[in-house]
Image (tube, grey):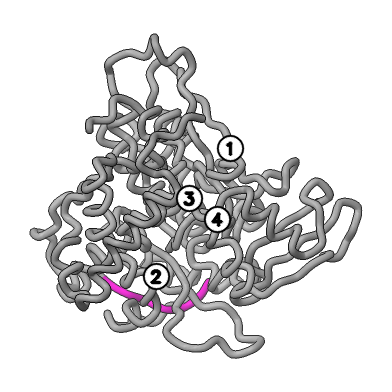
Amino acid sequence: MKLKNIGEVVKWRLCAGCGACAYACPENRIKLTDVFDDGIRPVIENEKYCGACRDCMKVCPGHELTHRSYDHVPGLIKELQEGWGPVLEVWEGYASDPEIRFRGSSGGAATALALYALEKEGMGGVLHTGADEGKPLKNKTSFSTLRKELIERSGSRYSPASPCDSLGKIESSARPSVFIGKPCDVAALRKAEALRPGLEKKVGVSISIFCAGTPSTMGTVELLKSLGLEAKGAGEVRYRGLGWPGLFTARLKGEKNPSARLSYKDAWGFLQKYRQYRCYLCPDGTGEFADISCGDPWYREIREGERGHSLVIARTERGRFLIRQSIEAGYLKLTRTGAKMLVDSQVNLLEKRRTIWGRLAAMKAFGIPAPSFNGFSLFKIWRSLDKKEKIRSILGTSRRIIQRGYYRRKTT
């Protein structure tokens, strides 16, 4: 079934919530709204008058992703390609600045890299996501140009975010800029660059954070409720950071100290149940389309009181240059490591990737539109599962399709 526009992507639950369609629509007919139990979703104003340009579909990562061939790229780590995409180098370490390291979700590497790009490479700004000051449960896309702004907006946000809605700020910037987002956001950026050459010229570097899925706003509301707090009374919600891996903290309006705390493990264990449907179909949890990817090195247990560390992946020559220059300039303290550290750090993301082909096969068997993933070797790595896991990947998805009515379009 061919999806005619972004409205169809939403109705078949394939939207990732990146916001790129709102940026790309030449008639500005697409507006974004936060659907409480789902995520940020586009709404087409006067859909019957929507033109035939399909620009919204051209930038959408939800229904299709294609890896540009990187077989010709010298120096890629071959044993990582099937499971992790293009990888030139793997590093572990942290931001040299103690404040950035402390406030970051892991070692503050993404913020330190962005700050180096601003201060030493002369980039115009950083497009990224931070908390909405007026609506603490919501996120807001910001274009930061100062160290203070970067640090204030650091830390993971396990709730809907759509940084691609503001790609126009990069396109109109006087100088190339930094983009930071989730893997699906960076994939959308790449598609938008292909549509708008002017944007491509203004992207100085793209940085992806590792991602296991985006919970809906409902997830945060329910988590607060489980801690005895009403969402309307919240003055600040922080999901991680201020230590490694950091605590989920919620502060009520008018209070100086947090009213509730929960470990990162327990908070994510609760929130992950509210992830949007498209996240269960995503093969890319580590930002394969980015120049640089940053995440947690979960290959070992974290000691109590230990300061944060980041895993940093160079995926392109542009990314490798920026990492090495950031180290030389004293913004990052990193140690070069091997392929095994990436695999051991993100076992769950690799296991999920192995199931994707089976999940897509189940959707196709029901005649449901399924996303197209080209260049990901999904069938090959699915075959590496044992027989029981192969069957589970298909039958488990089939059961959910029937039980939750996913064989029907959403009507609202």
Residue located 44% across and 62% down the image: 212
Residue 117 location, x and y as percent?
Answer: 45, 54
Q: Residues within 10 Å of mark 4 (few under 14, many from 20)?
A: many
> If you read the primary sequence from the N terminus, does the residue marked by circle 1 or circle 2 appear first?
1
Which of pointers 2 and 4 indicates the residue nearer the eye?
A: 4
Start-end of magenta stretch: 89-95
Residue 37 location, x and y as percent?
Answer: 58, 45
* Front one among 247 and 45: 45
Give amino acid for label 3. Answer: Gln
Residue 98 location, x and y as percent?
Answer: 63, 73
> If you read the primary sequence from the N terminus, does the residue marked by circle 1 or circle 3 appear first?
1
Badge 4 marks a residue whose secondary structure is: helix
Name the residue beneath numbered marker 2: 312
Q: Which mark is residue 274?
A: 4
Which of pointers 2 and 3 indicates the residue nearer the eye?
A: 3
| Residues under numbered marks 1 and 2 in contact, where contact means CB atoms less than 8 Å apart | no
Badge 3 marks a residue whose secondary structure is: loop
Q: Give the quadrant of the N terminus.
A: top left
Give amino acid for label 4. Answer: Tyr
Q: Which mark is residue 276?
A: 3
Name the residue beneath numbered marker 1: 34
> If you read the primary sequence from the N terminus, does the residue marked by circle 4 or circle 1 appear first?
1
Residue 299 in the image: above or below residue 409 = below
